[in-house]
Each structure stands twice: as structure tokens, then as C-alpha cells.
Amino acid sequence: MAAATLLRGATVGPAGLAWRWQLHAALRNYLSHGSRCLGGASADGATWTCFPLHERALLRVRGPDVAPFLQGLLTNELPLPGPAASAVPPPARATYAHFLNVQGRTLYDVIVYRLPECVPESPSFLLECDRTSLDTLPQHLALYRIRRKVKVEPWPECCVWAVLPAVAWAGQAVSLQERAEATSILTRDPRTVCMGWRLLTQDTGPDLVPGSMLGDPRDYHAHRYQQGVPEGVRDLPPGIALPLESNLVFMNGVSFTKGCYIGQELTARTHHMGVIRKRLFPVHLAGHLPAGGIRPGTPVLTESGQAAGKFRAGQGALGLALLRMEKIKGPLHIKTPERDPVAVTVSVPDWWPTATK
């Protein structure tokens, strides 16, 4: 049964109640359903799968004024510095956030990593973004830099990897050790526990994660679509997607207590009014699909032909669709010019904070 009421005001951040709720829900989900990309037990007994994400890239933003500069642009707080310890490197810190335009629509989705600081007065951050944004994101930052002492530059030294359990969790504690070093960063994915870990490294992922194997990126994206996690410009078209409709609150990607940032007014007003009529839902497509797949923006219709929303993006039979919440319970379909309509089945991810399902 679809969610009747979505909780508002859940604590945002890995230390909050929402994060602990997600952890327990994700464990139940893995135990009961597993996941296509995680598969069964691997032949070599690997417990982790490392997926190279070639469509993701890194920018380094550094300088004495970098913290207030980014704070005025991002929807979320910056990653906190690690504990002061001379002998032990600080644990990695990461935050999920969006850059918005002045109308409050998403321009870029990023994961922000705080680099180990050699000079505390001049901190450095890495922005993980869609590779197609490597030119436009620095231009966006340059619009607001003015005279601040901030430098933005590509960071091709490291590649982005996703690390997920290779088998469905069986109740045992599954964990890795967070680390932030000069050549690698390993940290939990800040969006949801279902997305595992993020690894930035100059080497190959399986070389750095004990008991891991190399995975197919298509399986990572299949898992991501099953969990309803948008990523990149295909899922979050710049200037079109709205952050709260894209479930930014559920993914720990927005702070409603931080200072002002570009696009904050509409985002905060929508949240406090509690009026979110559409959301980005994971969908499964059944039927004869066109050779090139379903085009982004294709209308999703109810059984009577009324508009329920639009298909956003996907891979094969899995994808995301922006749908009106009151329409997701009934039969939905997409018309195609070739044959019969394609049936659309909507699911509500177990890790979402929901009152009923």
C-alpha cells in the first residue's frame, strides 16, 4: 500500500533520529528483499562490491574564504572537521547538498567532502558532481565569488567509487573504517544507508576495500533507481527539478536551521507550509519498451487517461517519475507509438520516513 502520510520535520543528518530510523529500515529491507545489484553470495566470498562511477567527477574548492562562500550557496551545512588528534588521521566527513538558482530550483547535486587540513586557516573541500557539470559548475561559483579568496579547480587525481555490500545483510554487523588521507577518502554515503559508502581514490576500489570485488556500474544504477535515489543531471535536470519534490529532506540534503543561501526562500516556505503535492518515485516499467527507452518528460497517465506526472529518467525497466502523490495508488501507464501502453508500477522505498505503507 502506498504511503498515506509522509513525515515532516524529521531530524536531518547522520546523527539524527531519521538516520537511525533509515538504518533499521534498510536492514529490514535487505533481509526481506535484498537487491538486484547486490545479488547472491559471490563465488570468491567477497563481502563488498566496488562500482567505478565514470560519470561522476571532482572539483576542489579551497582558500581562506571557502567555508562562508559555500555556506551561502549550498542547501546543507558543510561537513564538520574531524576530531583534533595528532596521532590518528581524522575520519572522513561528507555532506549531500544541492546548488539552487534564485527561483529555488536545483542546478547541481553534489556530495561535499572535507579534505584533511594542512593549514587550518585555508580549508579545502571536494565537490563530487556530474561529469557534464565540470565546466558549468565553476562558472556558477564564479558568479558569487566576487573578491573572496577562493580557488576552484578540477581534481582529476581521484576517481569516484560506490561501495555496496556484495550480499544481502544477514544480521551481522557490516562496516568499514572511515578514513581521509592524501590519496583516498572512504566515508559513508550521506544520503541514505541503503547507498553504502563513497570511495575517492587514485587506485582501483577493490585494492583498498578488504574482501571486495569489481562491480558493473549498471548494477549500481539499477540499485539506485530501485531505492529511488536521483543522481546527476538526467535525474535532476538543472533549472527544472525542485529540491523538496526530489526528496532532498529524506536524503539528509537540506538544513532548515543554517543561514541564508541562494534559493532558500521558496525551499523553506514550501517545507514549513507542508504542501508537497508531487514527489520523485521509483517506478518499474512492464511491457514493450521503445528501442531508445522512455523519453524524459513523457506523461504518465491514470487508467482514465488523466495526467499523473512525468517520467524523469531510468535504465531499462527501472526509473524515476515525478508523480502526484494522490495518483500513485491506481493503475498507471505510459503511451508509446509502437504498441500497447507500458504499465507503470510505483513503489515507496522502505528507507523513506513514512507513517503507513
Image: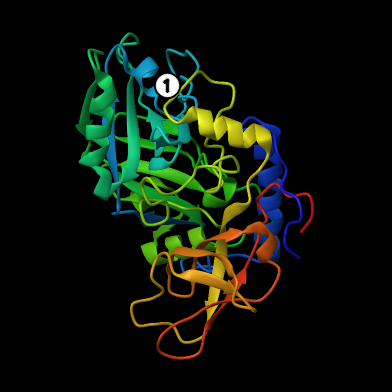
Figure quadrant of residue 216: bottom left
Q: Which residue is drawn at 47% across and 27% down?
A: 91
Q: Which residue is drawn at 40% across and 89% down?
A: 338
> Residue 241: x and y, percent?
45, 48
> Residue 145: x and y, percent?
26, 20
Q: Name the residue under label 1.
A: 71
In the rendered view, tell whether residue 108 sits above or below residue 318. above
Seen as rendered, the residue at the extreme bottom is 339
Give SS at disc 1: helix
Q: Residue at x 39, y 15 (%)?
A: 68
In the rendered view, tell whether residue 136 sits above or below residue 335. above
The amino acid marked with disc number 1 is Gln
> Residue 53: x and y, percent?
33, 53
Figure quadrant of residue 10: top right
Whether residue 217 is visible to the viewer of this picture, yes or no, is: yes
Q: How crowded is mark 1: few (under 14 residues within 10 Å), some or many (20 or more)?
A: some
Q: Which colour scheme is used?
A: rainbow
Residue 43 vs residue 159, the one in the foreground: 159
**Left or right side of 178 for 150:** left
The quadrant of the image that shows the N terminus is bottom right
**Left or right side of 250 for 103:** left
In the rendered view, tell whether residue 84 sits above or below residue 9. above
> Residue 229: x and y, percent?
51, 53
Whether residue 203 is visible to the viewer of this picture, yes or no, is: no
In the rendered view, tell whether residue 77 sits above or below residue 313. above
Seen as rendered, the residue at the extreme right is 356
